[in-house]
Image (cartoon, rainbow, N blue to C red):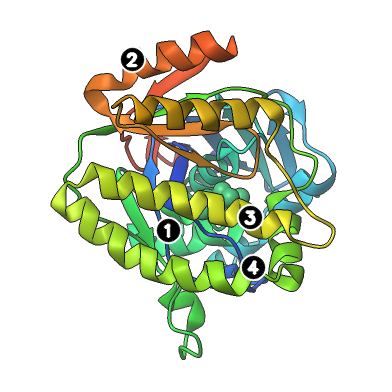
């Protein structure tokens, strides 16, 4: 008897140096601007998809527990996109294991949906090149498009009004990036966030008076960031990344009602990173939809900087380097 197809894939989180914040199409997950990120070598997510032809519905297990509510709805919605592409109907069992705390602004959804996209495409026998896989991963969580690739990655928004908007929005690895940097994550709090990034993004675009200014700056900063990466200019990379992240948080803090993911401890780390820079360290901060601060620095300094930030906060720190793109760990078994 032919066993039902199954596939397992692994993907790593990415942290944006120029952020994605705001959609122009909620259904297709099309962003308002390009973004640019670094895929990390820590916190992999491993996801298996097993087709279950005799089942009546999908089953989703996250870190050993059955998923419910919004998480279940998003994964089933994503499987529906894959099934429509494959012209198949079988339900699946999805089993995903994170090593990163979920929902804490540490890009668990980027790693999760990149791994799910690769595993599901294989299980449902949809053949996709990496660019097409990034378009598919985008449908699960925008930032997941970037975790399909390793190292520095640009996600193209695609021109507004493109004939095929889905086709025009994909991620691409930046092979000309020449920097030996690291990213130190300070794990201040690892519980789930009070407002989802999806909701915070929507609210910011609709109500923040600062959003148009930040969006215009972001469009310029993507180009400036590419130039700085190609030139190996860490000071410019760090300055742009920090400014872009502060700008993104300013937009959400001026939304109605405001969203503020940063805590007292986040501000303590941000202040300390600035103090380190004043005494000559090459350190710059970035923050996502959560309180945890990530610090860019030269690879050679990462362990020392991680130790110092651990000491002043009393919290765990992780020094990450550029990591790989999404890969299969087992093939389709038939
Ligand atoms: O992909 P989402 O919907 O989880 O949004 C990610 C948004 C940020 O992490 C705040 C920024 C980014 O570009 O990753």
Question: Reading the chain from its start, which is encountered first: label 1 or label 4?
Answer: 1
Viewer-nearest residue: 188 or 44: 188
Question: Reading the chain from its start, which is encountered first: label 2 or label 4?
Answer: 4
Where residue 80 appears, as percent x and y from the top left, is: 67, 61
Give how far apart the Cα atoms at labels 2 and 4 are.
Answer: 37 Å
Give how far apart the Cα atoms at labels 2 and 1 are.
Answer: 34 Å
Q: Look at mark 1 in the image and give the residue it sits on.
A: 133
Task: Assess whether mark 4 and mark 3 are in contact (beta carbons under 8 angstroms).
Answer: yes
Where residue 117 appears, as percent x and y from the top left, is: 51, 51
Give how far apart the Cα atoms at labels 3 and 2 are.
Answer: 30 Å
Asked which secondary structure carries label 3, the reply is: helix
Ligand 1 within 8 Å of the CB at mark 2: no
**Image position of 100 (left or right of 235):** right
Give how far apart the Cα atoms at labels 1 and 4 are.
Answer: 34 Å
Asked which secondary structure carries label 2, the reply is: helix
**Mark 3 surroundings within 10 Å by alpha-carbon count, few (fewer than 14), some (14 through 19), many (20 or more):** some
Instruction: Kindly tell me whether residue 21 is visible in this rendering.
Output: yes
**Image position of 128 (left or right of 185):** left
Where residue 27 appears, as percent x and y from the top left, is: 67, 71
Q: Look at mark 3 in the image and give the residue it sits on.
A: 250
Which circle marks residue 303 in the picture?
2
**Mark 4 surroundings within 10 Å by alpha-carbon count, few (fewer than 14), some (14 through 19), many (20 or more):** some
Give how far apart the Cα atoms at labels 3 and 1 are.
Answer: 33 Å
* Residue at 30% in and 26% down: 281
Which circle marks residue 210 in the picture?
4
**Mark 1 surroundings within 10 Å by alpha-carbon count, few (fewer than 14), some (14 through 19), many (20 or more):** many
Task: Assess whether mark 1 and mark 3 are in contact (beta carbons under 8 angstroms).
Answer: no
Where residue 67 appears, as percent x and y from the top left, is: 78, 36
């Amino acid at each position: 008897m032919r066993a039902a197809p199954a596939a397992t894939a692994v993907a790593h989180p990415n942290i944006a140096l120029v952020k994605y914040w705001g959609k122009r199409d909620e259904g297709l997950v099309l962003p308002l601007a390009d973004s640019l990120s670094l895929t990390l070598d820590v916190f992999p997510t491993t996801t298996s998809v097993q087709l279950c032809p005799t089942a009546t519905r999908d089953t989703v297990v996250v870190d050993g527990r059955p998923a419910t509510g919004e998480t279940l709805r998003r994964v089933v919605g994503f499987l529906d996109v894959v099934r429509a592409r494959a012209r198949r109907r079988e339900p699946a069992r999805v089993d995903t294991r994170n090593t990163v705390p979920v929902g804490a602004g540490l890009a668990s959804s980027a790693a999760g949906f990149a791994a799910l996209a690769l595993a599901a495409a294989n299980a449902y026998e949809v053949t996709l090149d990496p660019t097409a896989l990034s378009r598919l991963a985008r449908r699960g969580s925008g930032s997941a498009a970037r975790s399909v690739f390793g190292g520095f990655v640009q996600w193209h928004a695609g021109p507004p009004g493109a004939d095929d908007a889905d086709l025009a929005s994909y991620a691409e690895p930046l092979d000309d990036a020449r920097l030996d940097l690291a990213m130190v994550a300070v794990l201040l709090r690892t519980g789930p966030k009070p407002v989802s990034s999806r909701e915070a993004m929507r609210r910011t675009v609709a109500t923040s008076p600062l959003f148009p200014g930040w969006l215009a700056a972001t469009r310029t900063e993507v180009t400036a960031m590419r130039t700085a990466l190609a030139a190996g200019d860490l000071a410019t990379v760090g300055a742009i990344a920090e400014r872009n992240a502060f700008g993104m948080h300013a937009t959400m803090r001026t939304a109605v009602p405001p969203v503020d993911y940063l805590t007292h401890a986040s501000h303590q780390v941000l202040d300390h990173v600035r103090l380190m820079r004043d005494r000559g360290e090459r350190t710059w901060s970035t923050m996502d939809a959560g309180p945890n601060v990530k610090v860019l620095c030269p690879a050679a300094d990462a362990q020392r900087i991680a130790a110092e930030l651990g000491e002043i906060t009393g919290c765990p720190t992780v020094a990450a380097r550029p990591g790989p793109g999404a890969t299969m760990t087992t093939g389709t078994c038939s």
